[in-house]
Amino acid sequence: MKCFSFSSALVAGTTILSTASAKSGPTSVAYVEVNDNPITSVGQYTLADGSNTFDIAIIFAANINYNGTAAVLYNNEQVQTLLNDAENQIRPLQAQGIKVLLSILGNHQGAGISNFASQADAADFAGQVRDELNQYGLDGVDLDDEYADYGTNGTPQTNDQSIGWLISALRADLPDKLITFYNYGPASDYLSSSSPSIGAQLDYAWNADYDSFEVPDVPGLSNSALSPAAVDFENTPSSDAQSFAQQTVSGGYGAYMTYDLASGDDSAYISAFTQALYGQATTYNANAD
């Protein structure tokens, strides 16, 4: 399992010292629907020893739009407002030692991570992602093959090389940032039969079937980079979240993924799985934002 211990984070050219204690165990991940909830909620939870409950916060989500000729990265109003206020909403999380990633997914316009028609097209889009991450000082990108509606607006259908082209281009552009994969859609099928050299360029992949424990099939990634657990705060019973955490530890898996963390105190629910993951309860601090 990977041990997250962030003594510092390099953000937009400035070294920010982490105030959190180190912890040992699986990497805990929290997606936040920022249209409705604050990303700062991720930093309001700590374990009994003072370390962060969550290691990765994922902004859900930016979109892949289509401009008539190419895929373009697009932020809706809520995502753009958050990024514009990075100093107050993202930097404090990074100062705690929490990595902040941007999820990208389709927007019903026919463009997505599975239908780049050429290596050059994938590289062009990867460059857009690189520029946005660097501009706002983000720590990585999460790839999600939802809502593309391939074929809409005369866009190409999916192909088995697109996701590999994109991952390779992103890794070349972002050698020191995290690249993670939400194991869903055509891209998941293509990755499962791709060369391990493609998957090995990812840092993590997570199961996308909520309220289940299913091991993502990504050649090139070991158990330490996988989250078979898929926990939806709104729809996964606490007993299931706890069971998935126990299976994560017993199976030697290195990540534990949760979705739709909302504002307010959810520490009782979270403690059910952190006790299994780390042997510690979780505390909520309303002022830690």
Image: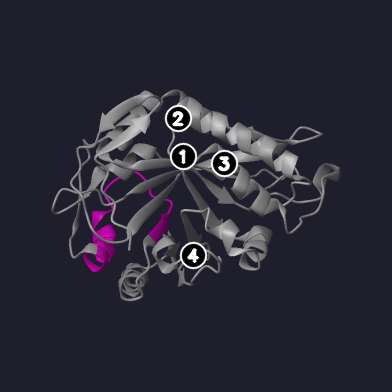
The mark lying in front, picked from 3 and 4, is: 3
Task: Report x, y in % for residue 242.
Answer: 31, 70
The disc label shown at residue 172, or none: 3
What type is the residue that disc 1 sits on?
Val
Q: Decide if residue 183 is in sight here.
A: no
Query: In whole angstroms, how far apart are the C-alphas of marks 3 and 4?
Result: 31 Å
In terms of depth relative to the viewer, which is nearer, 168 or 240? 168
Within-10-Å neighbours for mark 3: few <14, some 14–19, many 20+: some
What type is the residue that disc 4 sits on?
Tyr
Badge 2 element: helix
Q: Decide if residue 143 is in sight here.
A: yes
In terms of depth relative to the viewer, which is nearer, 11 or 266? 11
The disc label shown at residue 34, or none: 1
What type is the residue that disc 3 sits on?
Ala
Q: Is residue 261 magenta?
A: yes
Badge 4 element: loop
Disc nearer the start of the sequence (3/4): 3
The residue that disc 4 covers is 210
What type is the residue that disc 2 sits on?
Leu
Within-10-Å neighbours for mark 1: few <14, some 14–19, many 20+: many
Q: Is residue 128 magenta?
A: no
* Residue at point 81%, 34% (across, down): 69
Quarter residue 104 falls in: top right
Q: Is residue 23 left or right of residue 73?
A: left
Disc nearer the start of the sequence (1/3): 1
* Residue at point 49%, 29% (across, down): 134
The disc label shown at residue 82, or none: 2
The answer to whether marks 1 and 2 mark residues whose Cβ atoms lie closer than 8 Å is yes
